[in-house]
Every structure is written in structure tokens, then in C-alpha cells.
Amino acid sequence: MKNKRLTNKEALDLIQNASLQKLGELASKRKLELHPKKITTFVVDRNINYTNICWVDCKFCAFYRKEKDADAYVLTYDEIDKKIDELLEIGGTQILFQGGVHPKLKIDFYEDLVEHIAKKYPTITIHGFSAIEIDFIAKISKISYKEVIQRLKDKGLASIPGAGAEILNDKVRDIIAPKKLDTKDWLEVHRVAHSIGVKSTATMMYGTIETDEQIIEHWDAIRKLQDETGGFRAYIMWSFQSAHTQLAREIPNMKEQSPNRYLRLLAVARLYLDNFKNIQSSWVTQGSYIGQMALKFGANDLGSTMMEENVVSAAGVTNTMNQNEMIKLISDIGEKPAKRDTAYTILEKFYE
């Protein structure tokens, strides 16, 4: 019998009233329906932030710099190549390629960059350029979203990360990132990408000023788009990391997000997002223990070994994990570890 779709009212009730144990049981049951073989995956990749120069000034970000700042940069091809060479040495298959939103770089810069990587490293999947980057490249280059994505796809872009979603509610966005594209445009970038065969992920950053109702509004928006296009490969959720951020200075008594809150929201997401097969654990922000616990609350993927990460670490969080640690975390709870690629195709199994 097909699962009955969770309503917004039911999701709110679960977030606010269900016991954590009950949520874990419900999410685990749903996960097992989707992944009956108990295979839990991860990807070996590296985040490459090609520039930290950004004009968007998100209040929750501690990574960005202005052009004239002493530590502002745009990576050279040689610097990027060195990072990819190091990734290949440990068996990596993907780069998560994102930057700040540079105020002067147009489509030809990005085309040349993607083409350089794709030609020199044909085995590396380029998972890059979030909706905010695509939106600005389109504006500054005076072309459509479709042309931006198609031209980058033609040069070797494989898929798009879900960054820049934060909470898909414009009241929240207008406060935490007033210069960033609105909800409608974030969804449209992904809709257009899906329409031309470029898959993406959907993300959510919670723990700033949003309400439970606004979290569900976010889920509702991505569930509807997934119904329409089927183009999201996974959902990834993490909590706001406040250190060194403007938002924390503006709202000094902001509530710290507990592991209980993370697991609670993750479990309800697994139940609500019934058209998302894959949900990642956010061990980068939660640490390895809660990252492992997330596998008992609906997550079926540990995400990336993340050889390099700069954005979250700029906000004061520095959790790291290698392939062997991931294999052990997965095995320890009786699941089967496997290395995957960006498309969730299994490349290597670490179980009998």
C-alpha cells in the first residue's frame, strides 16, 4: 500500500509533539522501504572555492571577502589543478565547485574554467555553481538561466548543488541575506536545470530566525518542484553555524541548535519528502557521532569525506572524516558502506 502523503499540519505536529524515539522509528521504517538492502553511501570529494570575493554579504556567512581585502582571492588554474591532483591521489571522484558571487566575472570566465577542468580531469565530476551564482552570471552576462546552465553543461558541468536555499521563505531571506535571489528565482534556477538534464540537490540551513511553519514551507516548495521535475538527487540539511557571523552579532541571544533538534527535523524531512530517495547526514556541522545517529533518523548517505571545506570552518566548525572512518561509522550500526559517485551510482562496496 502506498504511503499517505504527510500534510503540512501533520508535519508541524510531528516536529512539535512527537517523541524523538517515535520519530526515529518512523523515519527508519520509511528509509528501509526506500533502501531495503541497508546500503549507506558516501562520496570522496573536495570542496573547491574558486574565489572568496562576494558582493552578496549574507549575514550568516563568515567566508566572503571584498575585492580590496588583503586575503581576497581568485584561484589560478595551477592552484585548482593542484587541489584536484591531491583529490585523485585519494581516489576522489567529484569536486564541489563554488565561490563567492564575484561582481565582475561573466559567463566566459566560467566556461573557460569548467572546460579546463573537464578536459584535463575527465574522470572528475564537476558538481558546481549554486543558484545564486547562476542567477548573477545570467544578470551580468545579460543572458537567461537556461543559456548559462546549457553553456556550462556543454563545457562539462555535471550537476548543481543546492546551496543558497537557506530557508525558502522571503521574509526570512530578506533579513538574513537581503541581496540574495528570492525563493521563486532559486526554484526557477533548479527547474530550468532539471529541464535540460542537469540534476541538482536541495538544501536547507535552519536555526536563524525561521519558524517551524517556515521550515515546512521550504519542504513544501522543494517537494512540489520534485513532483514536477524529478530533478533533485538528494536533500541535505544543516544548522546555522554562528561564530564570526554578522547575524550572530545582530541577534546575540540566538538559540543554539541542539542535536535533538537536528535529528527531529531530519526525521520529519524523511517522512515529508516522500519523493526524495536520498537524504544526506550533515556530519560536517553536527560531528561524527550525530552524523552517525542521523542514519537512524532517515539519512541513507554520509555525504562527502570532504578533503577540503572552507565555508563552515570559517564560522568556527571544523569536523573532518576520511573514508575509513566513514566505513567504520556505517558498519558499526549494522549497515553496508559503499562509495558512490555524484549520481549515486555505487563504485565500490565495503561489505560482503
Image (cartoon, rainbow, N blue to C red):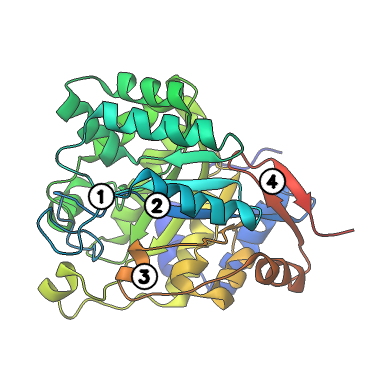
User: Going 20% across and 44% down the picture, which residue do you hit?
Assistant: 102
Instruction: Find disc 4 in the rendering and name its residue.
Output: 34
Q: Position of residue 179 (x, y in %)?
A: 13, 46
Q: Say if mark 3 contacts mark 4, CB within 8 Å.
A: no
Q: CA distance from mark 3 to mark 1?
A: 15 Å
Q: CA distance from mark 3 to mark 4?
A: 33 Å
Instruction: Find disc 2 in the rendering and name its residue.
Output: 79
Q: Position of residue 82 (x, y in %)?
A: 47, 53
Q: Say if mark 1 contacts mark 4, CB within 8 Å.
A: no
Q: Residues within 10 Å of mark 1 (few under 14, many from 20)?
A: many
- 2 or 4: mark nearer the eye: 2
Q: Earlier in the sequence, mark 2 or mark 4?
A: 4
Quadrant position of the N terminus in the picture: top right
Q: Earlier in the sequence, mark 3 or mark 2?
A: 2
- 3 or 2: mark nearer the eye: 2
| Residue 117 tag number | none
Instruction: Find disc 3 in the rendering and name its residue.
Output: 313
